Amino acid sequence: MSIPTVALSGVPDPLPEGLVVLDVREPVEWDHGHIEGALHVPLMDLPDRVGELPAESQILVVCKVGGRSGQATGWLAQQGIDAVNLDGGMLEWEGAGRAMVSENGQPPQVV
């Protein structure tokens, strides 16, 4: 099964209303910088927390470079959830100068 994937150039800026961003990185990565409004569910917690995802929304899944989010996207698709993986992940997002926020009081960055 192929993983639904989108390049950053295919993601509107600003993000469209109704699009849910799911960040599957670890807490320390999230704290350093993430997309404002994203839902944070580390990859290992996803099976237990899948019920937190809005049922009728398209979900853009992100991690640092796209590997973990690819795994998450494949799993979500098997559950019948409309999910797409961000190719290049948060490194591409940051490299393109897209807006990020941090939880640690420092300027947002991808670690």
Image (spheres, grey):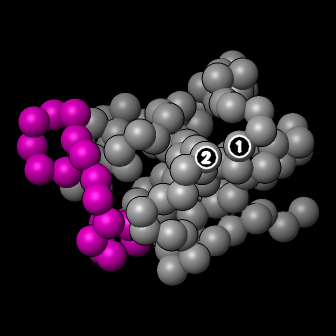
Mark 2 / mark 1, whichever is N-terminal: 2
Q: Is residue 22 left or right of residue 90?
A: right
Q: Which residues are magenta?
A: 91-108
Residue 71 visible, this angle: no
| Vertical placement of residue 105 versus 82, above or below | above
Q: Which residue is mark 1?
A: 57
Point out residue 15 in the picture as x, y percentages from the top left corner.
48, 59
State the residue at coordinates (71%, 43%): 57
Pointer 2 and pointer 1: residues touching (CB < 8 Å)? yes
Residue at the left extreme? 106
Mark 1: which secondary structure? Answer: loop
Q: Is residue 35 magenta?
A: no
Question: What is the CA distance from the residue labelled 2 to the residue labelled 1?
Answer: 6 Å
**Badge 1 local density, few (<14 within 10 Å), some, or many (20+)?**
some
State the residue at coordinates (72%, 21%): 51
Residue 107 visible, this angle: yes
Point out residue 67 in the picture as x, y percentages from the top left corner.
58, 59
Q: Is residue 93 magenta?
A: yes
